[in-house]
Image (cartoon, rainbow, N blue to C red):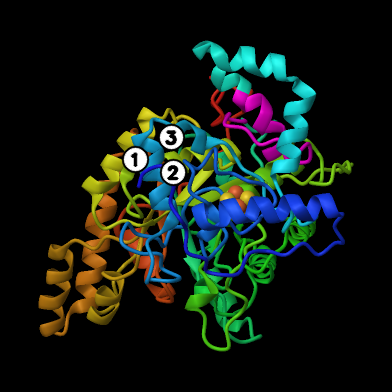
Amino acid sequence: MTGFTPGRRWQPAYSPFQKETFGERALRVIEYSVKGPLFGCHMCGNCLLAETALICPMECPKGLRNGPCGGSTSEACYVDPSRPCIWYKIYERSFEWGREDLLLEVLPPLDWEKVGKDSWGAIFKNAWNIGAKKILTGLISSETRAQTIDGIFRPVRQPAWWKGDSDYHPPAYVEPASSLQGQLVAGNFVVTAEITPPLSSSTDKLIRNIEMVKSLVTAVNFTDNQGATPRMSSWACSQVAMNQGAEPVLQMSARNRSRGSVQSEIIGATALGVRNVLCVTGDSAKMSPSPRDQMDINDLDAIQMLWVLRRMRDEGKYLDGREIKNPPMFFLGAAASPFSSNVKFQALREQKKVNAGAQFFQTNLIFDVNGMENWLNELAKRNVLDKVFILAGVTPIKSLKMAQKLANVPGVYLPKDVLHRIEVADRAGNAQEEGIQIALEIIGKIRGYEKQGIHGIHLMPVGWDEVIPRIVLEAGLVRRAKALPQFVEVRSSGLGVPAM
Ligand code: SF4
């Protein structure tokens, strides 16, 4: 049936935690008795069905309200492989119905005052305020129908504290916030590298690795409990990097954070000197070692986090409306996944991230440069390429075991010929060297896109940090310190243009 999709519940419907009046309870029971069987409604209190092609997004085990995570595939949700990713269904139907542009609107996180309560009351109330006559007249004409419907639903789904939209919001500042942004704006092909945070509280190895790479790369990323597995925090590693004179990219995952802690941490991190922030939704706690964290709730997703942080920086406001006298300053990034899903779906998701505030992308691992080109073409169709800097993710394969594992990681595409090369090299006891050569070849090919949307390389050695210098040097990626040019207004394109 195409009209509705009865969802399976991953968790029970929410319950109201406040006392209800008789009328509120009656309305809730009626709404749930209709939407429960039809849509698997969870009574989130802020219904998005109209934007999500009549499929309830709250079936997503991560509770994502702005699109799929990077781990999903068309076959299965990676948290619960016994079901398909609900966001694929939403995307498929939205494209089928020609309503995909509705998916660009940045939708708010749950309002916990409303969770468990009805959505219909607010919709009826809003319709009442508009007036029956105005609504009927608006609905009759095909020219005003969509606008009339939007007038009823938008104020309900986009509360005053959120005001999400589908528009691009260029950064409201001019001078580069960081050396990374400065290098990119200056047109330099940059290199960033990921260093694995330590498992212990000793910083000796961390410092050694930072010292090893700091003169070779523009900035160093520190992952935020990758795989939902606790390690030294990204902000602590960032502080160590700054002490060593290296520029960090602070990674913040939405997992395990509330909207309150996200805002507090960004104020603290920027006060300490962090100037690059990468927002990710984060791996599900499903990937963590046992005993696992709570798996069913993310207070924010990466897109909502971008939206909150951008507004703190550019509008000087906390989510609750309080003013920030000295707003935080940072260069805001997000992860991008060229191979996560259907490339059209993925491009829409990346556009939404850019609209929400992403100024740079660091992509997931790239082993298929032609596939990356398809993704770039889709981004170009969506006019995204002139609004975001893209650093292509490259990983040297260290062993056959790693290659076999990567071949099964959702969001990563490892072509058969690459796997075959590692298999052959492994038999000759030469897998590591072959992995390095493959990485160098990929970097060489990616550099062919330097003027076509790719602005640098993001090295992710997955714990093999010692390999970074060799790859940077042999690929000819050594950073050449250049004096930053003067910058002109960045609002026009969002990227910034060096003054002539
Ligand atoms: S979006 Fe919220 S209110 Fe709407 S069907 Fe899903 S859980 Fe229910």
Mark 2, Cα crowd under 10 Å, few <14 / some 14-19 / many 20+, is: many
The residue pinned by badge 3 equals 100
Drawn side of residue 463 relative to residue 199, left or right: left
Q: Do the residues labelled 3 and 1 touch (CB within 8 Å)?
A: no
Rendered residue at 76%/53% (across/down)? 26
* Mark closest to the chain's N terminus, 3 or 1: 3
- Which quadrant of the structure image shows residue 345? top left
Q: Which residue is at the front of the view, 60 or 401?
A: 60
Secondary structure of the residue carrying numbered label 1:
helix
Residue at position x 46%, y 35% from top?
187
Q: Earlier in the sequence, mark 2 or mark 1?
A: 1
Residues in magenta? Answer: 149-169
Foreground of the two, 243 or 273? 273
For the residues labelled 2 and 1, the Cα–Cα distance comes to 18 Å
Residue identifier under label 2: 390
Query: Taking 447 as reference, is 126 above or below it?
Result: above
Is 282 covered by the magenta stretch? no
Mark with earlier residue (2, 3): 3
| Disc 2 versus disc 1: nearer the observer | 1
Would you name the residue on which mark 1 appears?
Answer: 344
Question: Closer to us: mark 3 or mark 1?
Answer: 3
Q: Does residue 226 lie above or below 249 as drawn?
A: below
Compute the Cα span from label 2 to label 3.
Answer: 24 Å
Q: What residue type is labelled 1?
A: Lys
Q: Residue at 50% x, 76% y: name it.
A: 286
Label 3 residue SS: helix
- Residue at image position (62%, 76%) is 294
Left-right relation of 360 to 420 = right
Q: Where is residue 335 in the image (x, y as percent from the top left)?
A: 48, 53
